[in-house]
Structures are given as C-alpha cells and as structure tokens.
Image (cartoon, coloured by chain):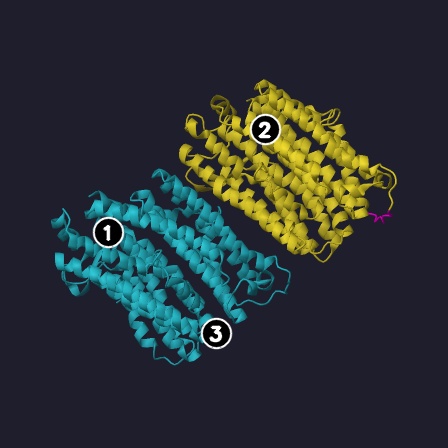
Amino acid sequence: MFNIFLDDAAALVVVLPLLISAIIAFIPSKIWPWIISLVTLVLHLVLSLHLLKEISISGLIIYEFGNWEPPWGISFKIDGVNIGLQLLFSIFVLISTFYSRKIFLSEIDSRDSGKAYSLWLLAIGSLNGIILTNDIFNLFVFLEISALASISLIALGAGQNRKALLAAFNYLIIGAIGATFYVIGVGFAYAMTGTLNMNDLIIQLAQYSDGQLAIFAGMSFMLIGLMVKAAIFPVHIWLPPAYSYAPSAVSTLLAALATKTILYFFVRLLYEVFIIYPSYLSLFLDFVLYPLSLLAIFIGTLIAIYQDDIKKLLAFSSIAQIGYITLAFSLKDHSGITSGFIHIFNHALIKGGLFMAVGYFAILQKDRVTLTSLKGFGYKYPITSFALLICGLSLIGLPLTNGFISKLYLFQALYTNQLYFSIALVALSSALAVAYFWKIVEQMWFSEIKFKSEKEDSYIYLPIWIITISIIVFGIYSSPIIEFSNLSADYLISGYQN
Amino acid sequence: MSNSFLIILGIITPLFAALFSYVCRYSNNLRDSFGIIGGLITFLVSLKIFHGIQNNEIFQITFFTLFDGVDFTFKITALGSIFSLVASSLWILASIYTIGYMRGAGEKNQTRFVIFYSIAIHAALAIAWSGNLLVLFIFYEILTFSTFPLVGHKQNAESQSAGRLYLSILVGTSLIFFLPAIFWIWLETGTLDFQDGGILINHFPAEHLSLLIAMLVFGIGKAAIMPIHRWLPAAMVAPTPVSALLHAVAVVKAGVFSFLVVIVYIVGPEFLLQTKSSDWLVWLACFTIMASSIIAITKDDLKARLAYSTISQLSYIILGAALASSLALKGASFHIITHALGKITLFFCAGAIYVTAHIKKVSELKGMGFKLPLIFFAYTLGALSIIGVPPFIGSWSKFYLIMGSIEREFIIVAIILGISSLLNIYYLLQPVVIGFTQNSRREVKLTKAPLTVWPPVITGLSCLIFFFYANYFLNNVSGVIVS
C-alpha cells in the first residue's frame, strides 16, 4: 500500500499539499488545520527523501502524468539539479509551518486559521511544482497559483496594518504583468515549435539553430517575466512592501523560498534550453543580468542601510542577496553556477532565520518592528536575540557561518572569471551590510535602557534555533551544500557542453 | 601535559574567566578575581609554550576542515609565543588595575565590562596561536566585536559614535581588504598555513605583490597605519583599563602582529626582498611615524596624546616588517614586547591620575608630580623606555630597527627614526616636566586608589630590568626569523 504511494512520490509532493489545502479550508478550528498541515508536510519530507534515494540510484526521474508521453502530457523532472532544492524546500516548509502557528494566532483572526493554512499549503504545493515541472506552460500555472496564494496570504496582514492590502494589490498587478510577459513568451515558443515540454523544446529549437526573431522575442518575454517574478533588480518593486506587510510567518516562507524557486527555474531555462543560442545567452548574461546584478547588490544594500522598519530592511537586503545569486548565475561556468546554488541554499536559511526572529519580535510587541522599538531586546528576549545575531553575522558573511561559504565560492567564481571589479564591489557591499545589521545590534544590546529578561515561547524559538544551528553547522561542515550545488552545476553544465 | 592540551587550556581559560565572572556577578570581589586567576593560568601556559618553542617543540592542534586546504587549526609560531606571553602577563596586572580603576571611577555595568574584557583576551591569544590566516581572521573579527562593548561602555552619545567609528573602520577594512586578500592568497596557493619562509614564493605573481601588501596593511586596520588610524583615538573614550591593555597591547598588537605574521610566514621576507614590493610601505610608515608624532604634540588630553604616540609606535613595527631584513624584523618583533611594556605603563599612569586626581589634560598637571610621586616615577620609566634611552628595554628594538634600515641602505629612514625619538622626548616627557612645576594654584582633592598605582610601577620597573635580560626574548625572536 505504502509502496504505491511512494511510486508516485514525484507527483505527490505537489499534489498532496494542494489536495489537503482544499480540505482544511473548511475546518472551523484553531489548531486542527495546523496539525493537518504539519502531518502533510512530514509526509512531504518523507516523499522528498524517497526521491533523493531514487535519484541517488537512477540519477533521473521523469514522471509522466496519466502516462501521457512527454510532448503531449505534462511531466515532472527530477534530477541532480533540483533534488537538493527539493530537500531544502521540504525541510524548510516543515520548520516554518511549525513556527507559524503562534504567529498566525496572534496576527490574524483565529477563525481564519483554516483559510490561512489552506492558502499556506496551496503556496507550498505550487512553489514545489515550480521546482519539479518540466513543462513551460505548467510552470505558468504554478506561478499563478503560488502568486494568488501568496497575495491572499499577504493580504491577511491587513489585520495588523492596512498597508498590507496595498502591498498585496501591488504584487497582484506587477506579478500579473510578469506572468503575462512570461505567457506571451510561452506563446511564441509554442507557435514556433509546437511543444511546451522542456526536453522536447530543446530538440525542436535545434531546427532554428541559426536563430529566428520570433524565438528571440519569445525568449526575451519569458526571461523578463521570470525576472519580475524573481524580483531581480530593477523589477523588484513589488517585493519590499509584500515581504514587510505580510504576516510574519508568510514573510518567512516567501523570503526563504518563493523567489528561490523561481530563480532556480530561471537558471534552468537559461542553461538547459536557451543554451542552444550561445550568442543570445551570452548577450543576455553579460549585458543584462550581470550589470543588473551588480546594481542590485549595491543599491539594495544602500537602501537597506536607510530603512527604519526592520522587515523592510531585510526585504531590501533580499534584493541585494538575490543580486549575489544572479551575479553568480551570470558567469556561464561551473564555478559560477555552483556558487549561485550554494547561495540559494544558504540565503534561504539565513533570511528564513532572520524573518522568523523579527516576526517573533513583532508579535511580542504587537506592533511593527522598527529600529527604535528594538531597544533593549537583547536583554529582554535573549534567546531569540542571540539567534538573530548569529543569522545576521552569517548575512555579513563572517567565517564559521554558512554565509562565509557562499562568499568564498562567489569570490572564487569571480576570480576565475577575472572580474576584479565585481570582487571589489561584493567586498564593499558585504562591508556595508555590517552597517545595516549593526544598527540593529546596537539598539538591541547597547542602547540606554535595560530590561529584565522575559519568558520566550519555546514553540517559536525552537524552530528559529534549528535554523540558526544549521547556519553554523553548514558554515563548518559545508560539504553537503557544496556537493548538492556541485551536482546541480554538473547537470546544467553538461547540457551546456553538449 | 601534552602540547595540544596546553593550547586548549590557554585559549579556553579566558572564556571560563568570562563565564565565572558572569556566574558570580553578584559578588564583586569574586567576580573580579577571575581576571587575575585567568591571567595567572594563561601566563603560566604561555611561559611554558615560550620555553617549548625555544626548545623547538611543536605546538599544534587541528579541529576540523573548513574548506579545501584550510583547517581550523592552532599552531604556535615563535612570533605567536612572544605575543601571547606579552598579552597574558600584562592581563594579570591589568586585571588588578581594572579593579582599582573601575571602582575608583565608579563605572557602571562592571560585570559586562569584565566579561568582554576576558573575551577580548581570549581572541588575542587565539590570534597569537592561530595556525593559518583564516583562523587568525576569525579571531581578529571576534576581537573587534568583543571590544566594541568596551569602547561604547559609557553608553552616552560620545561613546556611541566612537563605538560606531571603531567598528565601521575595523570591520569595514577587514571585509573590504583583508578578507579578499586572504581569498586571493588561497586561490593562488591553495593553502593559508603559516610556514617558515612564506608560502607565496613561486606561487604568487610577483608583479601583484605590492597590491597584496597594500590590501593587507590597509585591511588589518588594527595596525592603525595612516589613513586608517582614526579609530584608535576614538577608542580612547573607553575606560582606561581598555585603553591600557587593549588599545596599547592586545588589539593594536594583534594588528601589527597579524601583519608581521603575514610578512614572515605567508609572504616570506625572501620574496619581499627580491621583489622590493614593500618599499613603498617603508615611506608610508615613516610618514605615519612623523605625522602622528606631530599630532601628538598638539594634543592636550593625555590619553589622546598617548593614542597618537601608539599610532606612531605601531608604524615602527610596520616599518620593520616592510624593510623585511632580518635585523629589521628582529627589531619589529621585539618592539611588540618593548612598546607593550612601555605604553601600558603610560596608560596605567594616565588612568591612575584620572582616578586619583580627576585630571585628564596635560596642562592641568601642574604640581601633581609632588602629590603623586609614584605614578610620575612609573610614568617617567615608561616614557624613557619608549623614547629608547638605554638602559631601558625600548632602546633595544629601536637599535635593531635603525640597524635594519641601515642594512637595507635606507639612511633617511634611520634619520627619521632619530628625529622621531626627539619628538618622543618632547611629547612624552612634557607631562613630567609640567608635573614637577611648582605653583599649583588650585587645590586638587585626591582619591586613594592604590590598586591603580602599583601595576604601573611594576611594568615601569620591568622596562628597566628587562633591558639586561633582553637576550631571553631576543633568542626566541631571532631564532625563528633568521630561519
């Protein structure tokens, strides 16, 4: 019985959360939706581990829905590129769901609990779909589901601050524009090749090997659409308000995983499909993605320094960090792609941890977390504050944290590509990151007022500390992350060389 | 006791001192005693290691691998054994002094103070004993972060902005220049281990060595070469025990020590002499020596004056490293000891004067010499040592530095060193002269704080005594640098 279950693991990791999501929306209880979600995600993790086992044996799983063969049916593809991300995703959603309960209870109406977890699972299922799908139109569907689920989740923050509605609306409009761009691009590709399956697309595109304007137009539309969705500078404007006005649990999920999954698909599209046109690809990478990444790093960091609202500060820091990832991906070689994936993993953990800690502060003081409101928190809530400190040091990239590993490999990649100016800029902005992070530390520990320590909720600081410890562990014992990233790069680059 | 156990004992003792200080925070005497006990233990450990190094024993312990070719490892070099001996021995005296000062000056948050003080010592020792450049960097950063609460101790607007300046310069330079330089070395050589004779020769492109040296000397902001020196005067808002042990010994010496280590064990003096990539640094160091001496003359605040004097003296060490000849390196390494002894004496005295007489300015010292004879006696000893008058220990390092510059045929540098000594005489001895000027018009109320008086007397006298035992240290210094 269980084996049948496992045979369809590739489909179930997506379908299970979507199914359960439909069911729990109608449960009028405070706690049951959470428990059911938790159980679902434990199963989700089991399935992901099973997929890992399968991949380590066979190296590739193509799951055909309804046994329709790929060019016609939808298929999922799991290989070395996405298995690492799938695992990270499974583990992180489980931890953040565990964390989310108390946060949701205090930030949204408790009667909405079922609806919130329904949307929560919907977002998780669809984001997972983005990781696995092998079909460019199916991707659009998942993009839209995840966007709608995220928007509704962000709008739940309206109970705290009415601006959440505006942020959600912003995201809706800009996200829809991005999705439109993407789907227009898909239309072009379909018109030219008659296929939506990525593997088939590669084969079909080969017949236009000298290039066709329609194809280039389609590709450009797709890339721009994905850039909007992945919040790559300068089309990132929806992200800061969305992350900062969403309920804290939602910010955690979105900041850690939402853009990462899209970035993953972005790089997969670039290096698996568009690689057929090397001149187009290098044009895009060298003259669009590379400069934009540098701008994102620098401007994101600068804006973050001047933020007073901590969630906004973290959101702008995310813009810069996405810049690091796309900078690495723009390098066109193994070291670059590896370091990009390493940073996807590490940054998901770091930002997840930071948003979790700040989210907890927000519900503790029942108000938005600003610099001044953090006064003395280091003494008041030492356990969470200390976790925040470690996550922040990792964000700066100090040794013994995983952020350092990211930086090391990024430097190595830039150095082998002889991009010395970028090295200088990355070094400079990591020093500037100290500026915005230290403002927080100063308020928390070194401001005038002192407080007695207060009780902290172990249901909340436990997940925060799991993330924090993993940050240190992966800073010291970095080989799992490096190996997964190497594997991803191996798979993508092998496509590059063929 | 095995050698690796000694390393662990030495490194964790300050951490335990910090922990016990926190546990016993409600009993002031117990809390403050752990600094002294910790100092004694680390001093004995350092002494044993110092002798072990003299007997060519190997002290090494590896914990885990950080990434390819770089382990988290401690391996004690001859230079490291000197630095740790200085830092740990002075920690004992500084702990005693801290008790007198903090209580005498009625500072708040004394528990936090002693905790971070111990952590800073921990970081300094770990820097001294680190086995490769990355481990050194890790503890370099820990040292910065652990001294931040000490600099901003008073928590008023002035100390807060000073703390910000301190942190932004030190962390900023280390992240912008030092860390990329470390990455660069790693990418070119595949290792970061300290080895006699350096690791760069035959691996690193000689034409880029000047740039690497620049990244290192500006990246190691704690060495306070101009223009990266502003943090040191700013850090003087901290209570005097911090200025004394940390900003005359542990922190700044960690800076120049790091730079010396890089020159001796990473770049390699041979490689440097071949390429002459650090000759430009000789001139920058000379400029820093002269400029900061001149600024020191204009400062009326005693601690600020001492801070600029420190900047100038640190550049002696950078100068020695940049000259890279064996005599110059000998002088530079020895200067770590001599300047530490001399400068801690001066800071101890400045703090003692503040606690007993509440005077900070040089011009207000009139007649104080008669009232505080012991303090002024100690001050004079320390000042004479720093000026480099025989028979004080400071004369040795200056002698070797001058010899080193002549060896490299930098005659102008030797002259500059001489002029700088003259300037030293002026700005360091002026407070003594003023102190023994009669006609103090205003009456000064004196507070007794004997614990702040005796430590400077001890360090001052040791400046005199160790002149005759200089060989004891010099053996260790030269034994390694020549090889």
* Residue contact between numbered discs 2 and 3, judged by CB atoms under 8 Å: no
**Label 1 marks which chain's residue?**
A
Vertical position of residue A422 compared to residue B482: above or below: below
B404 and B8: which is toward the camera: B404
A30 and A451: which is toward the camera: A451
Residue B432: image location, x then y, percent: 80, 35
- Amino acid type at image mark 2: Leu
Which mark, residue A106? 3
Question: In the image, which lettered chain appears cyan?
Answer: A
* Label 1 crowd bin: few (<14), some (14–19), many (20+), radius 10 Å: few
Secondary structure type for disc 2: helix
Image quadrant holding the N terminus of chain B, namely top right
For mark 2, what is the residue? B319
Question: In the image, which lettered chain appears yellow?
Answer: B
Q: Nearer the viewer, mark 1 or mark 3?
A: 3
Image point (62%, 53%), residue name: B160
Image point (32%, 65%), residue name: A174
Query: Is B447 included in the stretch rendered in magenta?
Result: yes
Q: Seen in the image, is A228 located left or right of residue B73? A: left
Query: Is B130 included in the stretch rendered in magenta?
Result: no
Q: Seen in the image, is A299 located left or right of residue B164? A: left
**Label 2 marks which chain's residue?**
B
Vertical position of residue B288 compared to residue B108: above or below: above
Q: Evaluate whether residue B115 shows in this view.
A: yes
For mark 1, what is the residue? A58
Residue B473: image location, x then y, percent: 66, 27
Q: Nearer the viewer, mark 2 or mark 3?
A: 2
Q: Which residues are magenta?
A: B442-448
Return the disc, 1 or 3, that comes first in the chain's sequence: 1
Q: Seen in the image, is A390 located left or right of residue A290? A: right
Name the image quarter holding residue A11. Answer: bottom left
